Image: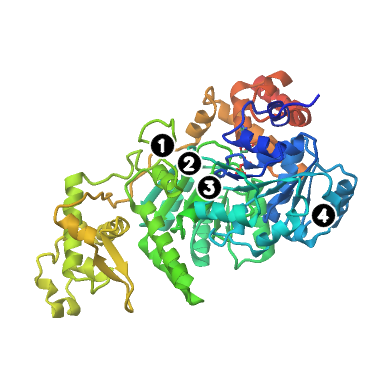
Amino acid sequence: MQLTPEEILKKRWGYDTFKPLQKEAIEAALAGRDCLVVLPTGGGKSLCYQLPAAMGKGLVLVVSPLIALMDDQVAAAREAGIEADALHSNLKAAHRGAAWQRLAEGKTQLLYVSPERLLAGDILNDISGRLILAAVDEAHCVSHWGHEFRPEYRRLTEALDRFPKAARMALTATATPVVQNDIRAQLGLRSPEILIGHPDRPNLIYRAFPRRDQSKQVLEVVRRHPGEGGIVYAQTRKDVERLAAKLKEEGVSSAPYHAGLSAEDRRRAQDDFVNERLDVIVATIAFGMGIDRSNVRYVIHANTPRSVEHYQQESGRAGRDGLPAECALFFAASDLATHRYLAKKDAQLAPEREHAIERQLREIGRYAVSPLCRHRLLTEHFGAPYPAAGGNGENCCNCDVCLGETKGLPDDEALLTAKKVLSAAWRAEGRYGTGYVVNLLLGRVNDRMTANGHDQLKVFGLLKEAGEASIRSWIDQLVVQEFLEVTEDGEYPLLRITAAGRGLCNGRGTVRLGSPVPPKVKGKKKPKALKKAAAAFLEGDEELFEKLRALRREMADKAGIPPYVIFHDSVLIEMAASKPQTPDDLRVIKGIGEHKLEKYGQIFLDAIKERLLES
Ligand code: ADP
């Protein structure tokens, strides 16, 4: 008898309920309808095409540009008992032969291919007649408007059109409405169901602080997560090398990763990280496309990313398993200038591209310096309301602002301070850069200031006590709130007051300013994170959790697969808390399907028993 999707979910994956929109996507696929699925990282996109494959009604094809991830995805699908394979250029010859063989024999249920492989055309005959669903992962790559355009994605329809009866499913984590339309058109989706999930990641705690001392601030976050997996992103190779050296010096198990290292060094660092032999990777954004480690507990941006989309994607690598994880960003306006310089260095940009870059820099700046709920800022950026319908309250309790770590100045003080900064910019008449206005407010005399007679102005030295760092931060905050603007009409960027800024000085409008002093975050997070994940988690359970983690690593090493493919951390946490004695006890834990129970159940039960006897 054919099982229902719900029954298969329980049997193969050990989950009781679908995550939002999974069921709709699966039903569309099984009914032969096209759909577009936009779900945030960790939203459970892979199950949308894996479950139809597990129904055993035919072949599901998955096109993905992330070749480095495919073998792990195949391993994970096999752990759920699915006949899965991958065909791509990096496959070892022996594996390739076996994969072709299974495909020719009609045994394959789920086949991952790179776009190049599909376009080469040689698999088309083998899949024709059996294909029920073609899933295109990372579908935003088809769009010029997205952030990772891949030309070969534009040609996928050539191949897909050969299978008019197979349903198409396009999946991505982020897509603005323009990108969504492009995906529909370019992939030839036929009256697709549009399934757009809420972009918020409630398990992530966001923090954005002004950068003062990069190494020290990075180290503070790393120290909050001893023994846990984390990624530190920095802007340049030099920053990466310096931070990696610092972490090593402090005894943190870490490695650098950037394009200047040999392919072998990079591969080793990535492998060690995914397989939990290494806790921290310090990387440029060259790192991450091939990372699926589900228990990354923190992502630090030691420099500002180049857009909110990049931030969402890079920080999104934290907490894919749904457990609490931290995303910290250390902002300095100079990072934006570096991004601007790098974007323009090699090529003359078309005006639209240049405007798009400026907009992106403004938006990420606004995210980083506004004393407003970070979950709200990110969610609204992607066009969704916050809190989500049915969500409770204004306070997310999960970002530096809502936790009271970043304090806003009281309203009257913020207004007064803003007026002082704005009057200085007004008096400078938009003819000078930020540095000049800062000097004016600090009361620093120089030849130009004297020649202009600006040392005689009332605003001269008006914020002397506040210090340069604070004034610069307030200027950044006023720029992102559009009371000030940086124009680049001439040779140098000039700071100018906007119409809204003049309005504020004349009593119209409101302003928010954060205290620019980086706050101290208290407390070690680790036990709290574990407790939050399992209601009954007690102090002593942590030791058992670590023991089970070591056992998982040992088994993963032997099998040559990443540990998270065997069990997610959430499963180990549940085991450590509920101490199951029998296979039936294991069945109630979310994330243990029949196949895994059979393969690993007894080994983990034995380890738990041993530990109970010891104590
Ligand atoms: P995405 O590809 O959208 O980033 P994944 O497919 O990697 O997300 O899934 C994220 C996590 O959610 C995985 O750990 C997966 O096992 C888990 N997951 C998927 N579906 C469910 C479900 N219905 N219930 C509970 N967990 C789920």
Q: CA distance from mark 2 to mark 1?
A: 9 Å
Please provide percent x and percent y for residue 603: 75, 29
Provide the secondary structure element on which disc 1 rests: loop
Please name the residue that numbered disc 2 is placed on.
200
Please provide percent x and percent y for residue 7: 71, 25
Mark whose residue sits in front, 4 or 2: 4
Provide the secondary structure element on which disc 4 rests: helix
Residue 582 in view of the camera: no
Q: CA distance from mark 4 to mark 3?
A: 35 Å
Q: CA distance from mark 2 to mark 3?
A: 10 Å
Q: CA distance from mark 1 to mark 3?
A: 19 Å
Q: CA distance from mark 4 to mark 2?
A: 39 Å
Q: Earlier in the sequence, mark 4 or mark 3?
A: 4
Tag 1: Cα neighbours inside 10 Å, few (<14), some, or many (≥20)? some
Left or right, 40 with reference to 54:
left
Mark whose residue sits in front, 1 or 3: 1
Q: Earlier in the sequence, mark 1 or mark 3?
A: 3
- Ligand 1 position by quadrant: top right
Quadrant (top left/top right/bottom left/bottom right) for the N terminus = top right
Please name the residue that numbered disc 1 is placed on.
387
| Type of the residue with mark 3 | Gly
Contact between labelled residues 1 and 2, with CB atoms less than 8 Å apart? yes
Q: Earlier in the sequence, mark 2 or mark 1?
A: 2
Q: Which of the 4 image quadrants contains residue 550?
A: top right
| Type of the residue with mark 1 | Pro
Residue placed most toward the observer, 161 or 451: 161
Contact between labelled residues 3 and 1, with CB atoms less than 8 Å apart? no
Residue at point 68% right, 27% down? 6
Please name the residue that numbered disc 4 is placed on.
124
Contact between labelled residues 2 and 4, with CB atoms less than 8 Å apart? no
Residue placed most toward the observer, 335 or 485: 485
